[in-house]
Image (cartoon, grey):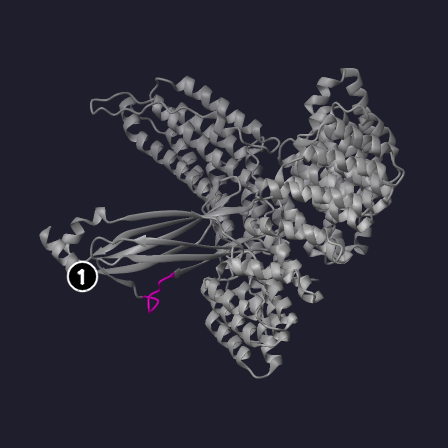
């Protein structure tokens, strides 16, 4: 039997499993920044030019591994020293370093010293040295944008007769114009004169035209640049001139927000009148840029003209570029103008059933987006709209058939198919059933990759009983050819895994009958995979089953895989998954039984025991690379929920068998009911904390956490409602006000079949609250609470996908200064001296950044509290000495820093706690950053001693 490969282990990417140091591994052992810097400095001082070059080219990786300002500043100071005294070959190496390390330039502290060393080379008589220096100025333009002497040197070098120096000056002008409005305005006239001058070569003119794109800082420069570009289009009709000039005009219009509508019309005229293919290509590319950047500036006439050009042009390359532009506009605010366009139907008739799949997919995406807009429904009659929807449905079905039979995977076409189907089923619901029948008939006869795409299409269409029947038919057809799986082990049987996920959308609820059907349908495929040693596919099926709630399938598969892995940590991980799935399967089997042979408390006890075994195994699987923090917390909270549910169920059973007097019932039971409500609320609060810590989780996983939290809140609401309605005002003045159920908090579930259970719970709570209103505690209260607990446990529980796989990783590393001399010693401060604490950090991302959300800013909170007072006098003032400071900083090139000035008023031993939070692009704060505790000891000086004696 073949074991699961370690590289494909279930941990992979689960908790940020990216090896951050892997990309920085060298033949030398770089233990810290100081040793690395010393090693490179030896190479810079070497008399061997080869060793010097080797040291120089290793600096960019040094900056990536230790991107802190003190090191970057020191390194650049040494490089600029070598640039001043070294040869041109070493200068070229340093030029490459400045190019590769642009994102670290902002960390240079001694900018003036670096510029002074670099500028000294500009005084050399060597034009090559000056050319290299000019290119360095261009690379570091972001930090020297307003240096007047550099501005003057660049303008002076533009008059050079040396070709290499002139090219360096053009590059520096291009980069510096993007950073400095002053330089761009000052050089505008000189660039215009050189372009119009007869002594400037054609190649140089073409390079200098690109600089005009940055002349958007003032109205005079904009006007001069636009006028020059229009003059050049007439004076130089060559293809190279026209292409670059048209593009510069477009960029200038977008940046300056002037003459945008005029530029769109201008490009449409060029597209229609100029017969050269390369000119038409650049015109339509610029139109796509306008469609992406400023779609609100398009009007009906522009879109109508673009459609007319599409219908009249014979070149397929231009036609497909125009279709891409129309698709971009259809997914923007410009769709309002498109709905009024008269050529939409003509475009569909011409390209909707095109033999080229790209043409057909783009056309259907464009037309379906327009048809899905409210403006199209208001414009057309119901009959015309229905006829157009039917035509779109036929076109989509033809596209699916053609793509499935092409046997070629094309990601863009798949994406367009998804969008088309989403649009058509929103406006024409009758298309659902026909699409389900078509896709279910195609899946068994296509390749694996296309089959996965078709399964995802079924998931888009939505959940109904017909979908489940279609999936059963698919599996039955695939089982007839299951022996062929042995020939395709490398594809991991992705079609079956995708169908497992689909079943959650087709099955109305997860019960024993559906679990048995599921297992019987998948059994032939699993047996073949095991026989072929394809255990990774078996794991994928088990993982998908756990994610959709089929724990009867997942639990035995995880158990069988435990003996197929080669690592102890993998063994414990799979063992934990087996216990978790076994516990959930035990609960589901009990709740959906018709004739229950055991009590709910015993069922929950078995589930709790399984969860505790799983937690023990999960903690044993933790490794330094895979902390499994989210997994452990999530499983622990689920175990706590089941534990309190078990004790609550036992308590309700005890109430039904115990006879109390009326007054005794209220006095005895109220504290226990309150304790249960508080426990459920505590679990809910812990889930909220876990939610806020899951910055890298996908949206479905976050919704899963919210649903779990709502179950806890509903249980707490139920207990609080019943207890509040049972309490009277006593002689001691005890009063519990009625607790109202906030239904808006519950209606967040986006999973199918989930809202039904939550609505059933809320209806029962309202019903029981009405029945129990004004009554004392009795056996009916325990019966009601137990019934609600059973209903909540029937809510299909699913493990979030983030529990198994994390698609993005974000890691923050902090560096705090000053530091103590020894790790366990506090920082010493002599009062009344203030302590300046600097917090620096670097942000590390995985290979896939910003898939779910992007980091926008960092929130740093510093809290200094008295840990130990040094005398009774200081202890008296302990409550007044806490310090709370907060800063929000935006990282630049994945680096951030902040400074806090701490004013300690009394001699004490303080604990300075630094907490880092992440703020995303939607201004949502995520408490996912690191924390740091720093001890600070404040000793009394003369002034402090006098103050203490006066007090």
* 853 left or right, relative to 435: left
Residue at far left of view: 950
Q: Quadrant of the N terminus?
A: bottom right
The residue indicated by pointer 1 is 941
Task: Provide the secondary structure element on which disc 1 rests.
Answer: loop
Relative vertical location of residue 178 with respect to residue 439 in this rendering, above or below: below
- Nearest the eye: 702 or 598: 702
- Nearest the eye: 337 or 499: 337
Residue stretch in magenta: 817-824
* 243 left or right, relative to 807: right
Q: Residue at x 46, y 64 (%)?
A: 110
Q: Residue at x 52, y 57 (%)?
A: 148
Residue 805, percent across and down? 60, 50
- Nearest the eye: 766 or 584: 766
* 312 left or right, relative to 204: right
Residue 520, percent across and down? 71, 42
Q: Residue at x 31, y 23 (%)?
A: 727
Residue 131, percent across and down? 64, 67
């Amino acid at each position: 039997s073949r074991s699961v490969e370690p590289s494909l282990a279930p941990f992979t990417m689960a908790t940020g499993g990216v090896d951050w140091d892997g990309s920085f591994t060298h033949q030398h052992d770089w233990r810290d920044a100081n040793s690395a810097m010393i090693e490179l400095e030896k190479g810079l001082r070497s008399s061997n030019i080869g060793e010097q070059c080797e040291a120089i080219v290793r600096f960019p990786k040094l900056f990536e591994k230790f991107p802190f300002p003190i090191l970057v500043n020191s390194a650049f100071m040494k490089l600029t020293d070598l640039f001043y005294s070294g040869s041109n070959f070493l200068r070229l190496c340093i030029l490459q370093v400045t190019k590769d390390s642009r994102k670290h330039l902002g960390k240079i502290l001694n900018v003036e010293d670096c510029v002074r060393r670099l500028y000294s080379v500009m005084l050399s008589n060597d034009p090559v040295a000056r050319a290299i220096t000019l290119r360095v100025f261009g690379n570091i333009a972001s930090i020297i944008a307003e240096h007047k002497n550099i501005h003057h040197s660049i303008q002076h070098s533009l008059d050079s007769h040396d070709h290499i120096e002139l090219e360096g000056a053009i590059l520096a002008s291009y980069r510096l114009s993007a950073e400095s409005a002053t330089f761009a305005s000052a050089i505008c006239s000189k660039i215009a004169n050189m372009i119009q001058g007869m002594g400037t070569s054609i190649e140089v003119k073409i390079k200098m035209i690109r600089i005009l794109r940055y002349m958007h800082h003032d109205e005079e420069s904009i006007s001069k640049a636009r006028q020059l570009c229009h003059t050049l289009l007439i004076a130089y009709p060559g293809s190279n001139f026209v292409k670059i000039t048209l593009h510069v005009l477009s960029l200038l219009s977008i940046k300056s927000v002037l003459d945008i509508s005029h530029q769109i019309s201008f490009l449409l005229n060029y597209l229609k009148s100029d017969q050269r293919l390369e000119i038409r290509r650049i015109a339509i590319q610029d139109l796509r840029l306008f469609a992406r950047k400023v779609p609100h500036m398009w009007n009906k006439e522009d879109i109508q003209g673009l459609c007319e050009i599409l219908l009249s042009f014979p070149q397929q390359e231009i036609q497909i570029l125009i279709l891409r532009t129309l698709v971009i506009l259809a997914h923007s605010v410009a769709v309002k103008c498109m709905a009024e366009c008269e050529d939409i139907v003509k475009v569909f008739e011409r390209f909707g059933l095109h033999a080229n799949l790209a043409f057909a997919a783009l056309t259907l995406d464009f037309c379906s987006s327009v048809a899905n807009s409210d403006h199209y429904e208001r414009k057309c009659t119901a009959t015309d709209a229905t006829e157009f929807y039917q035509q779109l449905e036929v076109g989509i079905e033809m596209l699916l058939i053609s793509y499935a039979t092409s046997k070629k995977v094309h990601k863009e076409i798949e994406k367009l198919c998804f969008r088309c189907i989403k649009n058509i089923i929103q406006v024409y619901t009758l298309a659902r059933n026909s699409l389900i029948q078509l896709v279910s008939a195609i899946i068994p006869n296509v390749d694996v990759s296309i089959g996965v795409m078709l399964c995802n299409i079924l998931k888009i269409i939505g959940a109904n009983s017909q979908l489940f029947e279609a999936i059963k038919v698919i599996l039955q057809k695939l089982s007839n050819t299951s022996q062929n799986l042995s020939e395709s082990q490398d594809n991991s049987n992705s079609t079956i895994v995708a169908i497992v996920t689909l079943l959650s959308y087709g099955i109305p609820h997860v019960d024993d009958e559906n679990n048995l059907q599921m297992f019987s349908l998948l059994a032939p495929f699993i047996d073949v995979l095991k026989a072929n040693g394809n255990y990774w596919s078996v794991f994928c099926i088990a993982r998908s089953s756990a994610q959709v709630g089929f724990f009867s399938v997942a639990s035995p598969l995880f158990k069988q895989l435990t003996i197929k892995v080669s690592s102890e940590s993998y063994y414990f991980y799979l063992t934990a998954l087996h216990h978790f799935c076994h516990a959930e399967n035990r609960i589901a089997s009990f709740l959906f039984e018709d004739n229950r042979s055991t009590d709910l408390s015993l069922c929950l006890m078995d589930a709790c025991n399984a969860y505790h075994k799983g937690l023990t195994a999960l903690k044993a699987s933790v490794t330094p690379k895979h902390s499994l923090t989210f997994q452990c917390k999530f499983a622990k909270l689920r175990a706590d929920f089941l534990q309190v549910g078990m004790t609550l169920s036992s308590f309700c059973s005890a109430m039904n068998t115990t006879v109390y007097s009326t007054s005794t019932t209220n006095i005895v039971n109220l504290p226990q009911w309150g304790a249960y409500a508080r426990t459920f609320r505590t679990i809910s609060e812990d889930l909220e904390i876990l939610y806020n810590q899951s910055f890298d989780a996908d949206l479905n996983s976050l919704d899963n956490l919210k649903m779990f939290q709502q179950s806890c809140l509903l249980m707490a609401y139920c207990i609080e409602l019943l207890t509040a309605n049972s309490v009277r005002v006593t002689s001691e003045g005890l009063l519990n006000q009625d607790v109202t159920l906030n239904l808006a908090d519950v209606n967040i579930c986006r999973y199918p079949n989930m809202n039904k259970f939550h609505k059933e719970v809320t209806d029962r709570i309202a019903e029981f609250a009405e029945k129990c209103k004004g009554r004392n505690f009795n056996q009916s209260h325990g019966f009601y609470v137990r019934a609600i607990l059973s209903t909540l446990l029937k809510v299909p529980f699913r493990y979030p996908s983030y529990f198994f796989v994390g698609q993005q990783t974000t890691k923050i590393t902090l560096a705090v200064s000053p530091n103590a001399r020894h790790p366990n010693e506090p920082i010493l401060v002599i009062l009344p001296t203030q302590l300046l604490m600097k917090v620096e950090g670097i942000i590390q991302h995985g290979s896939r950044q910003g898939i779910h959300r992007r980091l926008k800013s960092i929130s740093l909170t510093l809290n200094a509290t008295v840990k130990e007072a040094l005398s009774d006098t200081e202890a008296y003032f302990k409550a007044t000495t806490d310090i709370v400071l907060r800063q929000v900083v935006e990282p630049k090139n994945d680096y951030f820093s902040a400074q806090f000035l701490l004013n300690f008023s009394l001699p004490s031993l303080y604990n300075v706690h630094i907490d880092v939070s992440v703020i995303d692009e939607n201004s949502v704060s995520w408490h996912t950053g690191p924390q740091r505790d720093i001890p600070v000891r404040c000793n009394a000086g003369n002034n402090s001693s006098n103050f203490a004696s006066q007090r």
